Image (cartoon, rainbow, N blue to C red):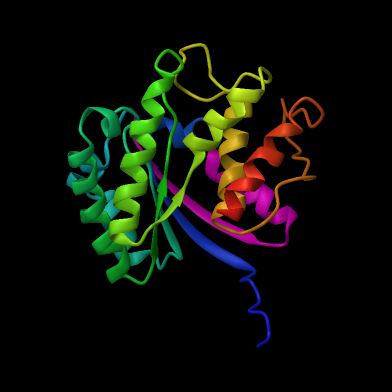
C-alpha cells in the first residue's frame, strides 16, 4: 500500500487560557510546522484563568466550533482542575468532544504541567488527561509529561516563569515541539525559529526530548 501523504495545510482552533496564550503557542507551532512544509492556520479563544466550563458557558468557543470547519480543536483545561476535580474536568471535555466530532473535527487535549512548587501533581494531571482522552477518542499532547521528563535531566533553560506556573519562551517552545511531534508527526529537531529570545544552542535538548512524544 502506498504511504498516505500528510496534509499540507491544517486549520486549528485552540481553546484555553494564558497557558496557551503566553508567548503565542499557536504561532510557535505554526512556525515550526512551516519549516516542515505544513501550513497551520490557527485561531485562539482564550480568557485568563478560564476553565473549559467557562468557555462552554460563553458564546465564542461553541460558535467557532460550529462554523469554523477546523481539522483539530485543542482543549486546554484550567491548570489545577485536573488535580482538584478530575471528574469536573472530564465532564467539561465530554461536552466539547461531542460537539467537536459532530462538526467534523478531531478533539485534542493539551496536557499542561504541574506548578513548580508541586511537581508531584503531574501524576494526577497526566492521569486525568489520559483517562478522558482515551474515553472520548481525543489525541492527548503530553506537554506536561515531557516537561517533567526534561526537568529531570536538564537545569537550563528555565521553563517556568517567575511565578512558578506560566511558561517562559523556552517552556512554550517545548510545548510547541511536543505538539509538532505528537499532533503533526513531524520531527522538531534542527528547526531554528526566527524570533527574539530564541537560542538554538542552549535549547537544543528541548526538541530532542519532545521528539519522543511523537513515538508514543
Q: Residue furthest bottom?
A: 1
Q: Is residue 36 magenta?
A: yes
Q: Measured along the vertical axis of the image, is residue 15 above or below residue 21?
A: below
> Residue 90, percent across and down?
23, 46
Residue segment shown in magenta: 23-48
Q: Is residue 50 left or right of residue 35?
A: left
Does residue 126 show up magenta in the picture?
no
Residue 3 appears at what percent x and percent y? 67, 80
Q: Locate residue 99 relative to residue 196 in the image: left or right.
A: left
Q: Quadrant of the N terminus?
A: bottom right
Q: Residue at x 40, y 64 (%)?
A: 106
Left/right placement of residue 52 relative to residue 139 reads: left
Can you tell which quarter of the image residue 36 is in? Answer: bottom right
Vertical side of 79 occupied by 44: above or below: below
Query: 153 or 15, which lies in front?
Result: 153
Question: Which picture quadrant has residue 67?
Answer: bottom left
Most foreground residue, 25 or 84 = 84
What's the residue at 78%, 41% (across, down)? 192
Instruction: Relative to 196, say whether 145 is above or below.
Output: below
Residue nearest the observer in this picture, 6 or 58: 6
Question: Can residue 173 be seen in the rendering of this structure?
Answer: yes
Residue 93 pos. (x, y %): 26, 50
Q: Is residue 142 left or right of residue 109?
A: right
Residue under the image location 61 percent in, 29 percent down: 150
Q: Position of residue 157 (x, y in %)?
A: 68, 20
Q: How many marks?
A: 0
Amino acid at each position: 500500500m502506498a504511504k498516505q501523504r500528510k496534509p499540507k495545510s491544517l486549520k486549528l482552533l485552540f481553546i484555553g487560557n494564558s497557558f496557551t496564550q503566553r508567548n503565542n503557542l499557536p504561532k510557535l507551532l505554526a512556525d515550526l510546522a512551516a519549516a516542515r512544509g505544513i501550513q497551520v492556520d490557527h485561531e485562539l479563544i482564550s480568557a485568563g484563568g478560564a476553565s473549559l466550563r467557562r468557555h462552554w458557558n460563553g458564546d465564542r468557543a461553541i460558535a467557532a466550533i460550529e462554523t469554523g470547519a477546523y481539522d483539530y480543536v485543542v482543549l486546554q483545561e484550567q491548570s489545577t482542575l485536573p488535580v482538584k476535580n478530575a471528574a469536573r474536568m472530564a465532564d467539561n471535555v465530554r461536552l466539547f468532544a461531542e460537539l467537536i466530532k459532530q462538526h467534523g473535527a478531531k478533539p485534542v487535549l493539551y496536557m499542561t504541567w504541574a506548578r513548580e512548587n508541586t511537581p508531584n501533581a503531574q501524576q494526577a494531571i497526566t492521569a486525568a488527561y489520559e483517562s478522558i482522552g482515551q474515553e472520548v477518542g481525543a489525541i492527548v499532547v503530553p506537554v506536561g509529561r515531557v516537561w517533567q521528563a526534561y526537568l529531570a535531566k536538564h537545569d537550563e533553560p528555565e521553563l517556568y516563569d517567575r511565578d512558578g506556573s506560566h511558561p517562559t519562551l523556552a517552556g512554550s517552545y517545548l510545548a510547541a515541539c511536543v505538539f509538532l511531534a505528537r499532533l503533526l508527526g513531524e520531527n522538531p529537531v534542527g528547526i531554528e525559529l526566527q524570533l527574539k529570545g530564541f537560542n538554538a544552542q542552549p535549547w537544543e535538548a528541548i526538541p530532542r526530548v519532545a521528539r519522543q512524544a511523537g513515538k508514543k
